[in-house]
Amino acid sequence: MEITEARVSPVEKSNGRLKGFATITFDNVLVVRGIRIVEGEKGLFIAMPNRKAEFRCGSCNAWNVFHARYCNRCGKELSRPAGAENSRGDDEKNYHDIVHPIDNTFRQYVQGKILEAYQVQLESGGPGPKSEAPLS
């Protein structure tokens, strides 16, 4: 699988950890949007698109996010399922990737292409409209 297009949008005021967003196209047939470019302790890395984890209400079976205290549909008080906490013991920040590479080699390939496109965008004028990076 080859990345045929990588588009990035740097964040204009990047005082925080978030530095930009990326969209990539695989083999001109599959697009993945919502990839975040983040500054970590060891440099830039990518965070794949994700969403907050949810669990079902025991009364009406409706989906609710983990930090909800009451059901969005029936209004009854919720009790979180066992094991709902993440590794930090913080149940409000449970997220699940929507899409993610399974193989570390492929993850490094995707990250390399996105960060390359990010650097090209910064060198060609910094924050602004989405631009394509030349892919080899």
Image (cartoon, grey):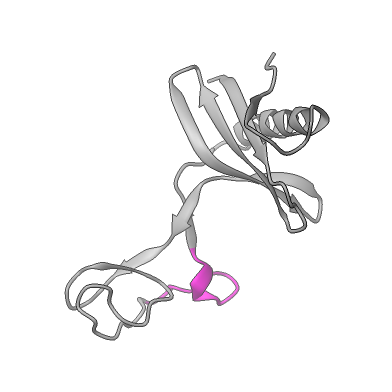
Q: Which residue is drawn at 44% across and 46% down?
A: 98
From the viewer's side, name the closer residue of 123 and 58: 123
Q: Where is residue 13 in the image (x, y as percent from the top left)?
A: 74, 52
| Residue at the outermost left position | 60
Count the marks: how many?
0
The answer to whether residue 5 is magenta is: no
In the picture, the quarter occupied by the C terminus is top right
The answer to whether residue 92 is magenta is: yes
From the viewer's side, name the closer residue of 23 and 100: 23
Q: In which quarter of the image is residue 90?
A: bottom right
Compared to 57, does 129 lie above or below? above
In screen coordinates, is 80 left or right of 124?
Answer: left
Compared to 76, does 50 lie above or below? above
Characterize the magenta stretch by its predominant secondary structure: loop
Q: Which residue is drawn at 61% across and 26% down?
A: 6
Q: Where is residue 133 in the image (x, y as percent from the top left)?
A: 69, 22
| Residue at the outermost top position | 136
Q: Where is residue 86 in the image (x, y as percent from the top left)?
A: 53, 70
Q: Which residue is drawn at 67% across and 44% down?
A: 20
Q: What stretch is highlighted in magenta?
A: 82-94
| Residue at the outermost bottom position | 77
In screen coordinates, is 41 left or right of 47?
Answer: right
Q: Where is residue 118 in the image (x, y as percent from the top left)?
A: 72, 34
Q: Quadrant of residue 81?
A: bottom left
In screen coordinates, is 52 left or right of 14?
Answer: left
Q: Which residue is drawn at 77% across and 27% down?
A: 120
